[in-house]
Amino acid sequence: MLRSRKDEIIAGWQKKFPAIAGAVIADFRGMTVAKITELRRLGRPQGVAVQVISNRLFRRATAGSPWEKVAKNLTGTNALLWHPTDPVAPAKVALEFLKTNESVTVKGGLLAGEAYDKAGVEAFSKLPGKNELRATLLATFQAPAQSFVRLVAAAPTNFLYLLQAREKALAAETK
């Protein structure tokens, strides 16, 4: 590979790093192209990108950044799973893929500038994703309003039930 091409790759990674919320590095030794394509397909709906990385170029690109902690121990064939906004999505995709493919191993990950080992990646894969957190927050905001509406609607509803019961009682008396 030409030196200019290597410099382009390094510059591209250095531009991407600040925009990446979470990433996982996996060893895909022994995987076929079809399996890597399956991993990419699994990550695509959640916005997770999968990219095979050159260890040497990745180390050069990460020098002086929080990513350096992850890159310093890279050996073998590695793929980077990353997402620009959801920090736990790559971990969820990686561990979902591991359930059916034993040949892949997770080496580590990066979340909010902190490097994690395999156990750390497994731990934060169990955290709720960004969309799940948004739904929970929205439900929390809506709960008081829904309770108020139920409270306001309860009095007329109960009065309606009282009138219906009285109507039935009068109809039973006339029979």
Image: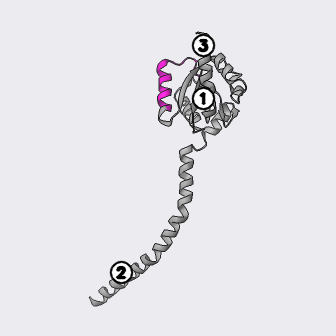
- From the image, tell me which residue sits under label 3: 4
For residue 69, what is the image quadrant?
top right
Q: Please state which of the two labelled residues, at mark 2 or mark 1, is closer to the viewer.
A: 1
Above or below residue 142? Residue 97 is above
Disc 3 and disc 2: Cα gap in Å? 84 Å
Disc 2 and disc 1: Cα gap in Å? 67 Å
Q: Which residues are magenta?
A: 25-43
Q: Earlier in the sequence, mark 1 or mark 3?
A: 3
Q: Earlier in the sequence, mark 2 or mark 1?
A: 1
Residue 143 x, y percent position in the rendering = 54, 62
- From the image, tell me which residue sits under label 1: 16
Q: Amino acid at mark 1?
A: Lys
Q: Count residues near mark 2 (Cα–Cα under 10 Å), then give few for <14, some for 14-19, many for 20+.
A: few
Residue reaching furthest to the left: 175
Q: Please state which of the two labelled residues, at mark 3 or mark 2, is closer to the viewer.
A: 3
Q: Please state which of the two labelled residues, at mark 1 or mark 3, is closer to the viewer.
A: 3
Q: Nearer the viewer, residue 133 or 39?
A: 133
Q: Count residues near mark 3 (Cα–Cα under 10 Å), then give few for <14, some for 14-19, many for 20+.
A: few
Residue 52 x, y percent position in the rendering = 56, 21
Mark 1 residue element:
helix
Residue reaching furthest to the front: 4
Q: Is residue 153 visible?
A: yes
Look at the image and say whether residue 142 sits in the magenta stretch. Answer: no
Q: Amino acid at mark 3?
A: Ser
Above or below residue 20? Residue 9 is above
Residue 113 x, y percent position in the rendering = 69, 35
Above or below residue 160? Residue 25 is above
